[in-house]
Amino acid sequence: MNNLAWLESLSPWPRDGFGIDRMRALLSALGDPQAGLPAVHVVGTNGKSTTTRMVEELLRDAGLRVGAYLSPHVRSWAERVRVDGAEPDLETALAAVRPAAERFEATQFEALTAAAFVAFREAEVEAAVVEAGLGGRHDATNVLDETRVVVLTNVSLEHTDVLGSTREAIAAEKLAVVHPGCTVVLGEPEWEPLARAAGAGTVLVRAGGSGSLALATAEEFLGREVDPGVLDRVMLPGRLERRPGEMRDGAHNVEGIRWLVEHLPADDYTIMASILADKDVDGMLGGLAALGRRFVACRSSNDRALPADELARRASAFFRVVEPEPDPHAALALAHRLGEPVLVTGSLYLLADLERPT
């Protein structure tokens, strides 16, 4: 089995609960590739990947050799690891971590995170911009020992079984990655007391989305101003991605849908979506109803995705025309027949499914 196939075969969820002890043991066996790496740690609910990519580009434009780590991916696993603006040889990085990862029974995310740190060490990056996967305190990325800036994009209810049942509890879990004295950049002002309680030396609040957060973060990291024009060239697959006759955006919760409604060009869209069962499904459908009258319900390959028939049943309360079609490729073709432009949304897993050949 090649290394990418091996990665895909790993469990995405830990069998014995969340924590970083196994991750620390894995990295120790690899010579602690993350040690001493000047870092920006990006946590939050929405906008983490966009913020990560923006900070990466700003630091690169300032002359640094930068590594970036993002999740999830849309087109390929290699999207998640970037070195100096490009995707490194992920097979080689995975080969370096595989023996130790197998010995410690690492999860999929732990193995990939370790591979990213190995790739950063091999490339001798001068800065790493690292997006957390789930939460912060128990996330596999919470092993960085030289974090200079933590970014908390925003907080909404998600993964409440792991992170807590209130926004305050979730924010505290995410801000647990703060190192004493480091700078914290917040997209929402209400978390300043929690950031200071976590040990932040400086707290900056920057409303206005990923661009504002990224500019403040890069300037704090560098100690000087940066050129905001660099942000115009940052593009991510599945984030307001234009294609012929369609738009694709992986908005996967109510706040993501709200942002999408505010930023999408006005039109009468045919909406094609898959939604995970543990999300606020009706809240998301209600938000999407502002964008169009036609809805195609499908099901992504994620085990937590609602069956297409169930999603269609719930969507019928919000849309005039509702069609269930479980297969993503067939659902996309149906949506185009119902009327363009088509909006594909609800899950980054769905967008990844569409990138796979039929």
Image (cartoon, rainbow, N blue to C red):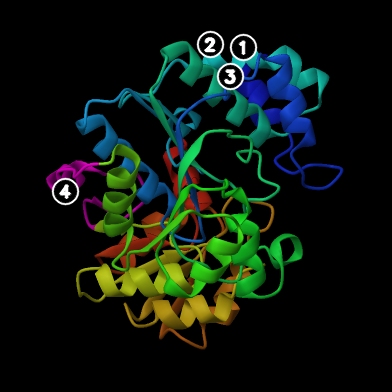
- First in residue order: circle 4 vs circle 3: 3
Q: Secondary structure at mark 4?
A: helix
- Asked if the magenta segment contains residue 102, the reply would be no
| Amino acid type at mark 1 | Ala
Q: Is the residue under label 1 in contact with that under label 3 (CB below 8 Å)?
A: no
Q: Is residue 51 above or below residue 97?
A: below
Q: Is residue 160 above or below residue 129?
A: below
| Amino acid type at mark 2 | Thr
Residue 276 in sight here:
no
Q: Is the residue under label 1 in contact with that under label 2 (CB below 8 Å)?
A: yes
Mark 4 surroundings: few (<14), some (14-19) or many (≥20) residues within 10 A: few
Q: Name the residue carrying label 3.
A: 33
- Mark seen at residue 228: 4
Residue 64 in sight here:
yes
Q: Secondary structure at mark 2?
A: helix
The label nearer to you, 3 versus 1, is 3
Mark 1 surroundings: few (<14), some (14-19) or many (≥20) residues within 10 A: some
The residues colored magenta run 224-245
Q: CA distance from mark 2 to mark 4?
A: 35 Å
Q: Position of residue 252 (x, y in %)?
A: 50, 63
Q: Residue at 83% of width from left, 47% of height from top?
A: 17
Mark 2 surroundings: few (<14), some (14-19) or many (≥20) residues within 10 A: some
| Amino acid type at mark 4 | Pro
